[in-house]
Amino acid sequence: MIMRWLCLCFYRKSRVLNYYQWTPFIILLMALFFYLPRLFWRSLSVRSGIDLLDLAEAAGETKTVND
């Protein structure tokens, strides 16, 4: 009984989980994919010459004037 328990403990300690070492890379990749559309949108809006922030503020002012 004790020998079986010792073997089981040794087996648990000697086994290595390889997928945990990839977790930071996967999270970093997910963060990059989350951030890329923002960069893409910003670069295209700057090149178009239309300032979306001013456009949104003007729409908000128009809504408050109409109310």
Image (tube, rainbow, N blue to C red):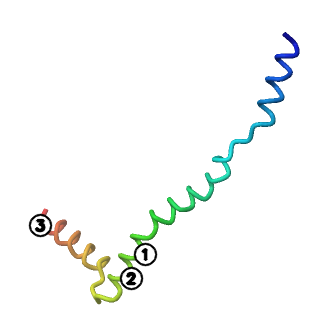
Query: Judging from the image, what secondary structure is the residue with disc 2 in?
Result: helix
Residue 50 rendering spot, x and y as whole percentages: 27, 85
The residue depicted at 44 percent of the width and 70 percent of the height is: 36
In this view, 4 is above or below 66: above
- Could you tell me the amino acid type at mark 1? Leu
Residue at image mark 3? 66
Q: Earlier in the sequence, mark 1 or mark 3?
A: 1
Instruction: Give residue 46's quadrant in the image.
Output: bottom left
Residue 4 rendering spot, x and y as whole percentages: 82, 16
Query: Judging from the image, what secondary structure is the residue with disc 1 in?
Result: helix
For label 1, the crowd category at 10 Å Cα-Cα, with few meaning under 14, some 14 to 19 and many 20 or more, is few
For the residues labelled 3 and 2, the Cα–Cα distance comes to 33 Å
Please tell me which residue lies in front, 65 or 29: 29
The single residue placed furthest to the left in the displayed view is 66
Residue at image mark 1? 39
- Label placed on residue 54: none
In this view, 24 is above or below 1: below
Residue 61 rendering spot, x and y as whole percentages: 22, 71
Q: Which of label 3 and label 2 is nearer to you? A: 2
Instruction: Give residue 42's quadrant in the image.
Output: bottom left
Residue 13 rendering spot, x and y as whole percentages: 80, 34
For label 2, the crowd category at 10 Å Cα-Cα, with few meaning under 14, some 14 to 19 and many 20 or more, is few
Please tell me which residue lies in front, 16 or 27: 16
Q: Earlier in the sequence, mark 3 or mark 2?
A: 2
Left or right, 30 with reference to 50: right
Quadrant of the rendering where the N terminus is positioned = top right
In this view, 46 is above or below 59: below
Are the residues flagged by discs 1 and 2 in contact, CB closer than 8 Å? yes
Left or right, 33 with reference to 61: right
Residue at image mark 2? 43
